[in-house]
Image (spheres, rainbow, N blue to C red):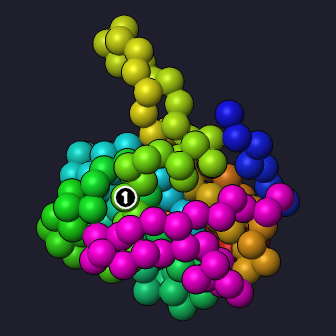
Amino acid sequence: MSDVTVGKKAPNFSGKTQDGSTVKLGDFKGQHVALFFYPKDDTPGCTKQACSFRDSYADLTEKGVAVVGISVDPVASHEKFAAKFDLPYPLIADEDKKIVDAYGVWVEKSMYGRKYMGTERSCFLIGPDGKVQAIWRKVKPAENVKLVLKELDA
């Protein structure tokens, strides 16, 4: 389990996105970053979460917030997902699970009595100083953006 906590420096990350470019935490120096982790492209909860960030994207960027989504799906899957739902922000393909591990969101899950490893739907708000400002674990897809905006206004 990682020791990512509020007030500590956010773990650095770097990964390929849906357009083939590489995005890293350092690209957003001086900005807030809403870093959201989701289990799987184009599934109901993940689509709701991703689209709520899309729908609030203008509000977030106006407040100086960069949005980055991360799942362990491959680049090609992100490409289809982003195109299908017109997502305006980078989706990082964390296929080697380095980022989900660093943030402690690769966890044991259970469905229908079957245990398996998967991504815990979570969101980290990273401040302009590179430190974690807020963490929402097991966040509800529809509430994620509202929580980020509320934290920014606090």
Give the percent coordinates (x, y) of residue 23: 48, 75
Residue 134 figure quarter: bottom right
Q: Residue at x 54, y 52 (%)?
A: 99
| Disc 1 residue crowd, few under 14, some 14–19, many 20+, Cα 10 Å | many
In this view, the residue in front, 78 or 112, is: 78
Examine the rendered structure and indicate whether residue 79 appears above or below residue 43.
Answer: below
**Residue 55 at least partly seen:** no
Q: Residue at x 35, y 18 (%)?
A: 111
Left or right of 132? Residue 144 is: left
**Residue 25 at least partly seen:** yes
Give the percent coordinates (x, y) of residue 144: 50, 57
Q: Which residues are magenta?
A: 8-33
Q: Is residue 28 magenta?
A: yes
Give the percent coordinates (x, y) of residue 88: 33, 80
Residue 132 figure quarter: bottom right
Kindly state the secondary structure of the residue where label 1 is placed: strand
Q: Residue at x 58, y 63 (%)?
A: 13
Q: Residue furthest right?
A: 7
Q: Residue furthest top?
A: 113
Examine the rendered structure and indicate whether residue 28 appears above or below residue 145.
Answer: below
In this view, the residue in front, 9 or 34, is: 9
In this view, the residue in front, 7 or 53, is: 7
Q: Quadrant of the C terminus?
A: bottom right
Which residue in the structure is indicated by mark 1?
A: 93
Q: Residue at x 58, y 83 (%)?
A: 27
Q: At label 1, which amino acid type do we have? A: Ala
Q: Is residue 3 magenta?
A: no
Q: Quadrant of the N terminus?
A: top right
